Image (cartoon, rainbow, N blue to C red):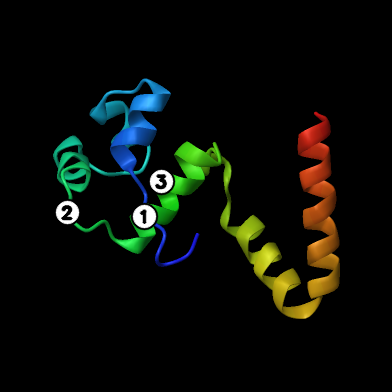
Amino acid sequence: MKATDKIDAREIRRKLGLNQQQFWSKLGVTQSGGSRYESGRNMPRPVQQLLRLVHVEQIDINKIRRDDYEVVEYLKANDSSLFKELKKLAKAARKAG
C-alpha cells in the first residue's frame, strides 16, 4: 500500500458484515476511535497497515511471533533472492490450497 492509497474502513467493515466494535477491536482500536476514523479523522499509518493485514489480507496477527518477523527481516537484508523465491512459493501454495 502506498502512502497515497486511501483506505475506506467503513466500506471494508460493511462488506465484512461486522459492527464497529467487532471490526476495530481486532486492531486494538476502541469503537469510538474507529468511529472517528470512519467519519474522516486522519488514520495513522500503523493503523492503516494493521487494517490492511487483518481485514483485507485476512492475516491473524495473534499468530505472528516476533521470531518469525526477525527471520523475515534477516532474509530480506541478507539473502533477498531467497526471500523473493520463498515469497513466490508461499503465494503459489496459498492459491493452490
* Whether label 1 touches label 3, CB < 8 Å: no
Task: Look at mark 1 in the image and give the residue it sits on.
Answer: 6
**Rendered residue at 85%/60% (across/down):** 85
Classify residue 78 by image quadrant. bottom right
For label 3, count other residues whose C-alpha is less than 10 Å away and answer few (under 14), some (14-19) or many (20+). Answer: many
Mark sitting on residue 51: 3
Residue 79: x %, y % from top left: 81, 75
What distance separates the C-alpha of mark 1 from that of mark 3? 12 Å
- Tell me the SS state at disc 2: loop
Q: Earlier in the sequence, mark 1 or mark 3?
A: 1
For label 2, count other residues whose C-alpha is less than 10 Å away and answer few (under 14), some (14-19) or many (20+). Answer: few
Classify residue 15 by image quadrant. top left
**Rendered residue at 80%/64% (across/down):** 84
**Rendered residue at 21%/47% (across/down):** 37
Q: From this view, report whether residue 51 is shown above or below residue 16.
A: below
What distance separates the C-alpha of mark 1 from that of mark 2? 12 Å
Q: Earlier in the sequence, mark 3 or mark 2?
A: 2
For label 1, count other residues whose C-alpha is less than 10 Å away and answer few (under 14), some (14-19) or many (20+). Answer: few
Which three-letter amino acid code belongs to the residue tagged 1? Lys
Classify residue 36 by image quadrant. top left
Position of 97 with respect to 54 (left or right) is right
Which three-letter amino acid code belongs to the residue tagged 3? Leu
Quarter the C terminus occupies: top right
Position of 7 with respect to 19 (left or right) is right
Q: Nearer the viewer, residue 67 or 27?
A: 27
Q: Nearer the viewer, mark 1 or mark 2?
A: 1
Residue 6: x %, y % from top left: 36, 55
Which three-letter amino acid code belongs to the residue tagged 2? Arg
Task: Look at mark 2 in the image and give the residue it sits on.
Answer: 41
